Image (spheres, rainbow, N blue to C red):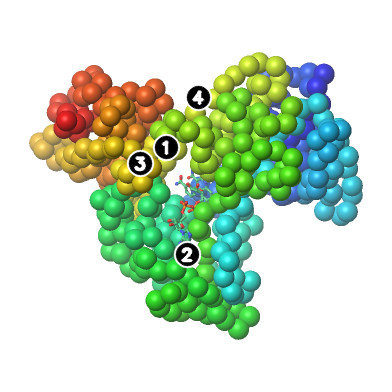
Amino acid sequence: MERIVVIGANHAGTAAINTILDNYKDNKVVIFDSNDNISFLGCGMALWIGEQIHSSEGLFYCSKDIFEKKGAKVYMETRVERIDYDKKIVFAEGKYGQRYQQEYDKLILATGSLPISPNIEGKELDNVQFVKLFQNAKDVIDKLHNDALKDIVVVGAGYIGVELAEAFRRVGKNVTLIDNMHTCLSSYYDQEFSDIMSENLSSHGIKLVYNEIVTKLEGNGKVEKVVTDKNEYHADMVVLGIGFKPNNRLGKDDLELFCNGAFLVDKQQQTSQPDVYAIGDCATVFDNSIQKTNYIALATNAVRSGIVAAHNVCGTPLESIGVQGSNGICIWNLKMVSTGISYAKAKKLGYDAAAVDYEDTQKPAFIEHDNYKVKIRIVYDKKTRIVLGAQLCSEYDISMAIHMFSLAIQEQVTIDRLKLTDIFFLPHFNQPYNYFTMAALQAK
Ligand SMILES: Cc1cc2nc3c(=O)[nH]c(=O)nc-3n(C[C@H](O)[C@H](O)[C@H](O)COP(=O)(O)OP(=O)(O)OC[C@H]3O[C@@H](n4cnc5c(N)ncnc54)[C@H](O)[C@@H]3O)c2cc1C
Ligand SMILES: NC(=O)c1ccc[n+]([C@@H]2O[C@H](COP(=O)([O-])OP(=O)(O)OC[C@H]3O[C@@H](n4cnc5c(N)ncnc54)[C@H](O)[C@@H]3O)[C@@H](O)[C@H]2O)c1
């Protein structure tokens, strides 16, 4: 029997814990989490805030109870303060000051990420919000009920910022969305795609402010103003969504780190310390699109890395196959999905890259209903011909289409192989000259 300690029981921790408890029943599993809930789907936060779902109930898929019924010992609201990696002991403290020492044979770090806090004056003012935890969402929703709270400035037009801008607008607030880049969603899409999202956001009344750097927040107790290098914006609430950083506090002096501080792991999720594994947002991933170690904070990566670590910890060797950072967003019915890297990113990274684009309706023109335009871009390396990334955008649900490109990047498929990939045709679904083939065929 092994003593397995898991620190952090959100998406990564939950996946690892369930895999161990369901498949390797003879171990002693001890879980610590500093929060009071498990498995909160942050991805549902904007839907809840924007009143597209009526409650937060469905946003949890696991609990302390479930783990305990499967035989684990669970300490909630208990923060691990320090780890003695030589003696293999975890030191934790409960909400009421209770102290715990737990020895381990194998340790899984699933401490996740923290929202990046900009180094600006005024960020401690009331109504300056991060949106990561269930408690953050509850707090924001309580404040939104106050009709005097009218103007919301969202800083960061990435995934969190864009989703929340929509949510705030849906509940009738005036929304200004600020990003220091020249467009929204710039880490995921080329401007030809992000411009479509910008147009969608502005047409719903969101004020877009790009290429401005927030320099300070002003107010009297409560935030009242966002000051940038070029302008000032009135704000009754400011939401900061400028990215995540890995929560590495428990290992930053003892484990090897990636350039952004994430725990550096191998394909088995093992850190530089023997018997210590790291998963989810606190750890690195192997990024197949650039064939290098990278940091990509997504729940999907968290879950898969948890499964991989669990099997290795319990003695079944299993290697991660890497990730492509596949992602998607849906804002007022405009759906955008991407995988791998954009053309702009490929160029920035020094690839001799090319992009092929195609635009068409999803189905033949004679289909009069539920037939929308689809825009596709495939990015590839001109030298190796290998696919580096893909982007799709439509009001039609094209989400499943991105998985094919995800697999192509994972398997290092060339653009030329995609030209003749067998794609079925039925007018109810698509076209005989479909946009995958038509885009790929353009590759010279
Ligand atoms: C608003 C929002 C929307 C999102 N939408 C999506 C989406 O649509 N798709 C997607 O793939 N991803 C999405 N994400 C990202 C996704 O939520 C994260 O990638 C995911 O939560 C990572 O899971 P994790 O378990 O690694 O880390 P976390 O969720 O950060 O969990 C870490 C856990 O560790 C615990 N912990 C930390 N330190 C200690 C300690 N010292 N002692 C004890 N416990 C500790 C914390 O309490 C927490 O429970 C979204 C995130 C947000 C905020
Ligand atoms: N739909 C989804 O899959 C989804 C939804 C929400 C969050 N997430 C994930 O959660 C993580 C965190 O999301 P996020 O939106 O915070 O990060 P993000 O990386 O998606 O976006 C951060 C944005 O902030 C901007 N930014 C950075 N510094 C800034 C500054 N000082 N001032 C103004 N803008 C600045 C960046 O240009 C970028 O557009 C990401 O990994 C994201 O992929 C995913």
Residue situated furthest bottom in the rendering:
220
Image marks 4 and 1: residues in contact by CB distance under 8 Å: no
Q: CA distance from mark 2 to mark 4?
A: 34 Å
Of labels 2 and 4, earlier in sequence is 2
Of labels 1 and 3, earlier in sequence is 1
Residue in the image at 37% along x and 66% along y: 211
- Residue under numbered circle 4: 321
Say what amino acid the circle numbered 3 marks: Gly
Say what amino acid the circle numbered 2 marks: Val
Of labels 3 and 2, earlier in sequence is 2
Of labels 1 and 2, earlier in sequence is 2
Q: CA distance from mark 4 to mark 3?
A: 24 Å
Image marks 1 and 3: residues in contact by CB distance under 8 Å: no
Which quadrant of the rendered structure holds the C terminus?
top left
Q: Nearer the viewer, mark 2 or mark 4?
A: 4
Residue in the image at 63% along x and 41% along y: 257
**For residue 326, which numbered disc appears in the image?**
1
Residue situated furthest top in the rendering:
316
> Where's residue 253, x and y in %?
73, 44
**For residue 350, which numbered disc appears in the image?**
3
Residue in the image at 89% along x and 49% along y: 98
Mark 2 Cα-neighbour bin, 10 Å: few <14, some 14–19, many ≥20: many
Secondary structure type for disc 2: strand
Q: Nearer the viewer, mark 1 or mark 3?
A: 3
Find residue 137 and report its image quarter.
bottom right
- Residue under numbered circle 2: 155
Which quadrant of the rendered structure holds the N terminus?
top right
